Image: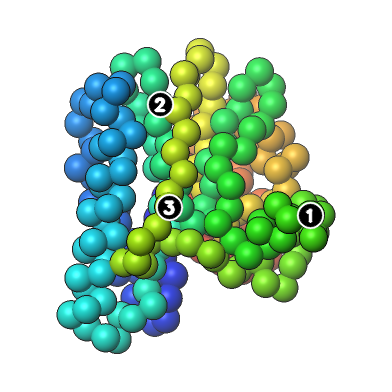
Amino acid sequence: VADGMGGMAAGHVASRLAVDAMASLDVPIDNEHQMDALHKALEAANGRIAEQVSADSALQGMGTTMTAVIFSADRAALAHVGDSRAYLLRDGRLNQLTKDDTYVQMLVDQGLLRPEEAAGHPRRAVVTQALQGEPVSPSYVIVEPQAGDRWLLCSDGLTTVVPPERIEEVLLSGAEPQECCERLVELALEAGGPDNITVI
Ligand code: CA
């Protein structure tokens, strides 16, 4: 998931550049090279964004989130920067694998804001890190997949309006992945859907 940000159409340019860079990972990759491959692709994405911005000052400030998982052999590796999210449903429970790179998450981490207050906070859209052509510190997670796991990758267009309990219910319903995605988008739209909504 690459959720573009920054004035006019530039967010779209940044997310497209990032997705194109990540597409190089759609090949068999050994377990031990997963993280390195993700890291290199993120660096490449960031480098291409930097190039475009320096070539066209109108693109200044554009950026994109990136939450990506590669599955190969018996492992999955996740890379994350920004406020999109990855969840793993396992043993009947929804686990959030990523931490938002946002101002409100920082307040929550510092104990200045309760987690349940974060979604309604007026500054919830302030992202502290994204691919913007500047140095970033993505986070990485390795997961050993198990039979029955369900993964969800989504933009904040879902999570700012649909609480995790509702997301868990939908994933637990046993519906096919496509049906779950459609249901989650519907729930976000019913809740006002103020932002673009990406659900995988
Ligand atoms: Ca968004």
Q: Amino acid at mark 2?
A: Ala
User: Residue tagged by mark 1?
Assistant: 111
Q: Is residue 62 above or below residue 94?
A: below
Residue 150 in sight in this render = yes
Residue 182 in sight in this render = no
Q: Is residue 159 above or below residue 195?
A: above
Closer to us: 123 or 89 = 123
Residue 195 found in image quarter: bottom right
Mark found first going from the N terminus, 2 or 3: 2
Closer to us: 76 or 1 = 76
- Secondary structure beneath label 3: loop
Q: Amino acid at mark 3?
A: Ser
Label 2–label 3 contact, CB within 8 A:
no
Mark found first going from the N terminus, 2 or 1: 2
User: Residue tagged by mark 3?
Assistant: 137
Q: CA distance from mark 2 to mark 3?
A: 20 Å
Position of 116 with respect to 148 (left or right) is right
- Secondary structure beneath label 2: strand
Marks 2, 3: nearer the viewer: 3
User: Residue tagged by mark 2?
Assistant: 76
Colouring rule applied to residues = rainbow
Give me the residue at 30% from left, 21% from top. 31
Give me the residue at 30% from left, 80% from top. 59
Q: Is residue 158 above or below residue 6?
A: above
Badge 1 crowding class, 10 Å Cα cut-off, few under 14, some 14 to 19, many 20 or more, is few
Give me the residue at 68% from left, 35% from top. 168
Q: CA distance from mark 2 to mark 1?
A: 32 Å
Residue 154 image point, x, y percent = 52, 48
Residue 105 image point, x, y percent = 66, 56
